[in-house]
Image: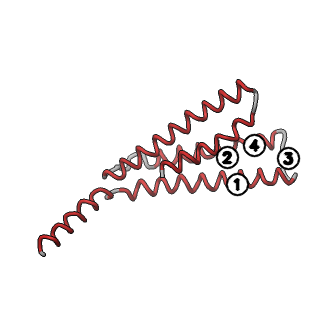
């Protein structure tokens, strides 16, 4: 009986070692997702106002609605990464989580280039409408 208890303690210690150190990384990821949700949620709201005719859907205002949230998010993301650049990533789970999201991010970047090339060659802006779906798919796979 004592060996069963010790075996359970050893197993628990092993599992604890796997997930140790994920707190700082999860906080950074959470901060990034907070800002992404806030900025892109605001962008979706502005697009909805465009469909209602409250916000202009052409000209400089429409371009600002389309591009400013991404520009601001890139600046915020850069600031978050710079702030947390010296945070030590420890534990197998932290490294695995980081690798998965880096892979998903790289795949999203590649797909952005694929959609940009396809939209340019076909002359169809509508092709870009598939890119958010692919981003959500990659994020779902990563989670």
Whichever of callouts 3 and 1 sits on the residue coming sooner in the sequence is: 1
Position above or below: 126 against 89:
above
Instruction: For label 2, count other residues whose C-alpha is less than 10 Å away and answer few (under 14), some (14-19) or many (20+).
Output: some
Whichever of callouts 4 and 1 sits on the residue coming sooner in the sequence is: 1
Mark carried by residue 69: 2
Q: Mark 4 points at which residue?
A: 64
- When asked about the image quadrant of residue 64, the answer is top right
Q: Residue at x 12, y 74 (%)?
A: 2
Q: Distance between the residues labelled 4 and 3?
A: 10 Å
Q: Which residue lies furthest to the right in this view?
A: 53
Kindly state the secondary structure of the residue where label 2 is placed. Answer: helix
Residue 136 % position (x, y): 59, 48
Which of these two is toward me, 81 or 138?
A: 138
Residue 54 % position (x, y): 86, 54
Whichever of callouts 2 and 1 sits on the residue coming sooner in the sequence is: 1
Report the quarter where the N terminus lies. Answer: bottom left
Q: How many numbered discs, if any?
A: 4
Instruction: For label 3, count other residues whose C-alpha is less than 10 Å away and answer few (under 14), some (14-19) or many (20+).
Output: some
Q: Distance between the residues labelled 2 and 1?
A: 8 Å
Q: Mark 3 points at which residue?
A: 56
Q: Which residue is drawn at 70% across and 30% down?
A: 119
- When asked about the image quadrant of residue 8, the answer is bottom left
Q: Mark 1 points at which residue?
A: 42
Q: Do the residues labelled 4 and 2 touch (CB within 8 Å)?
A: no
Which of these two is toward me, 103 or 91?
A: 103
Q: How far apart are marks 3 and 1 (CA)?
A: 15 Å
Whichever of callouts 2 and 3 sits on the residue coming sooner in the sequence is: 3
Q: Distance between the residues labelled 4 and 2?
A: 8 Å
């Amino acid at each position: 009986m004592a060996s069963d208890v010790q075996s359970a303690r050893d197993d628990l210690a092993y599992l604890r070692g796997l997930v140790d150190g994920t707190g700082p990384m999860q906080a950074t990821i959470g901060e990034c997702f907070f800002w992404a949700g806030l900025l892109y949620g605001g962008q979706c709201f502005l697009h909805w106002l465009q469909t209602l005719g409250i916000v202009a859907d052409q000209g400089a205002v429409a371009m600002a609605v389309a591009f400013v949230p991404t520009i601001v998010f890139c600046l915020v993301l850069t600031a978050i990464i710079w702030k947390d650049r010296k945070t030590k990533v420890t534990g197998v789970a932290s490294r695995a989580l980081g690798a998965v999201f880096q892979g998903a991010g790289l795949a999203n970047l590649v797909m952005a280039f694929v959609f940009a090339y396809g939209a340019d060659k076909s002359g169809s802006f509508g092709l870009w409408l598939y890119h958010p779906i692919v981003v959500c798919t990659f994020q779902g796979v990563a989670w």
